[in-house]
Image (cartoon, grey):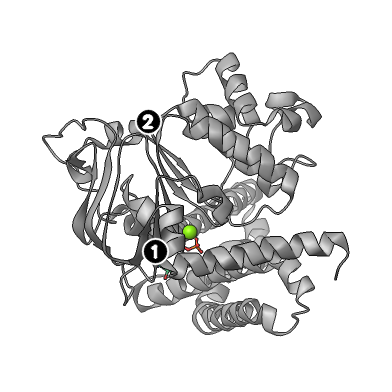
Amino acid sequence: MMGGKNAHLMAEYQAAQDNMSKAGTEYVRGIPVVKVFQQTVYSFKAFKQAIEDYSQKAEYYQVSVCRIPQSVNLTFTEGAFIFLVPVVLFMAPKALADGDFAGFVTDFVFYAVFSAIISTALARIMFAASGTMLANAALRRIDQVMSAPVLPITDSPKTPQGNKIEFKDVSFTYEGADVPALSHVSFTAEPGQTVALVGPSGGGKTTAASLIPRFWDVTSGSVEVGGVNVKDTDPHVLMDNIAFVFQNNRLFKTSIFENVRAAKPSASREEVIAALSAAQCMDIINKLPDGIDTLIGTEGTYLSGGEQQRIALARAILKDAPIVVLDEATAFADPENEVLIQKALAALTKGKTVIMIAHRLSTVVGADKIIVLADGSIAEAGTHEELLSKDGLYSRMWADYNQAAQWKIQAKGGER
Ligand SMILES: Nc1ncnc2c1ncn2[C@@H]1O[C@H](COP(=O)(O)OP(=O)(O)OP(=O)(O)O)[C@@H](O)[C@H]1O
Ligand SMILES: [Mg+2]
């Protein structure tokens, strides 16, 4: 039933079951989107497909493969006792006639107990077999993860000197992608400078930032930190020197205190509070029932996107690394939050080498250098003034940005 050529059927059946739970989770998570956009039939197409696939596989496996062996198996293991009854009925008169009724009863008890043990033992063997199959399938999945290539680490690491960041003719293609996400990108951030990466969505900003802490390795060219290729640096030293604020921040489902302290496990409570305060988080802390010990993600204590961003900034402030890579969240619309975030950013980036990805151009006006990335290449580079005078992509983006800002003021003034 489970071995030989049926093993792969069993694996398919389990994979279908897996798919169904994944599709189900995705569907439930997407319910707000489905509601807002009034999607009905199409939205659960994938989920429906997964259920149908599962029921088809389950039916085939259970009906065609398992029905007969399982029926035979259950009849004999679970029902062995039944066969004793006719035997007893058949033999009882003879035993009575022979006068050895006591011996007959003892025999009967022996077989009754023995048959029950056999059925339990067989059932155990059966469950052990299916357990082994499940374990094998799970092991295969673990193997898949474990066989992912290990980040190559150098045997003789070099020590970075200073915090200069340099991209030298960097190209990078994601595995399985046809077009490079970055091609021939070169720029330098001197120690203490703020270099801003801007440009259209999908231009390669996040990708470029991810190459600095080696989330990926370049396809060609090199990324240098402190004059040393990141591939020749001890990864721990590299990570110690970089604080990274992600575009989509994930807070752990634990207290705010632990969430911030993750950046520096040795930090004291006072240090964590100081970081939270520098990141303008005190208003969040004050309104929560247990202050910094409030568990995030439990009932009633969800934080807004802007609030999560500020907690993430507190985490980066606590780390106090000389290099800061900031991938600004695309959207936190309310102006109050924006002011607080600007203050938190100022606290974080003071005196640091900063690579800042910005979606709102107001953030980058003061940057030492602005790199405009479009379709994976540098379209333009320079300071805000230089780029405006060039009348290129940046000046168009700036005009659009200002128009959008102006539109907001007009709308508030009631002119539209
Ligand atoms: N993990 C990934 N695997 C494959 N392709 C990816 C991956 N991440 C990004 N890409 C692709 O690489 C290109 C650059 O993406 P990237 O995320 O760097 O853009 P971005 O400039 O940060 O955009 P945004 O402003 O929307 O954040 C895009 O075409 C994107 O689809
Ligand atoms: Mg991005």
- Is residue 289 shown to the viewer in this render? no
Q: Earlier in the sequence, mark 2 or mark 1?
A: 2
Q: x and y percent of residue 305 in the render?
A: 67, 48
User: What's the CA distance linking mark 2 and mark 1?
Assistant: 25 Å
Relative placement, left or right, of 195 versus 158 is right
Q: Classify 342 as above or below 60.
A: above
Looking at the rendered image, the quarter that the N terminus falls into is bottom left
Amino acid type at circle 1 is Leu
Q: x and y percent of residue 350 in the render?
A: 47, 30
- Give whichever of 105, 265 is nearer the camera: 265
Q: CB of mark 2 within 8 Å of CB of mark 1?
A: no
Q: Residue at x 46, y 75 (%)?
A: 12
Q: Secondary structure at mark 1?
A: strand
- Observer-side mark, 2 or 1, equals 1
Badge 2 density bin: few <14, some 14–19, many ≥20, Cα 10 Å: some
- What residue would you read off at disc 2? 322
- Give the quadrant of residue 26: bottom right
Q: Classify 382 as above or below 166.
A: below
Q: x and y percent of residue 205 in the render?
A: 42, 58
- What residue would you read off at disc 1? 373
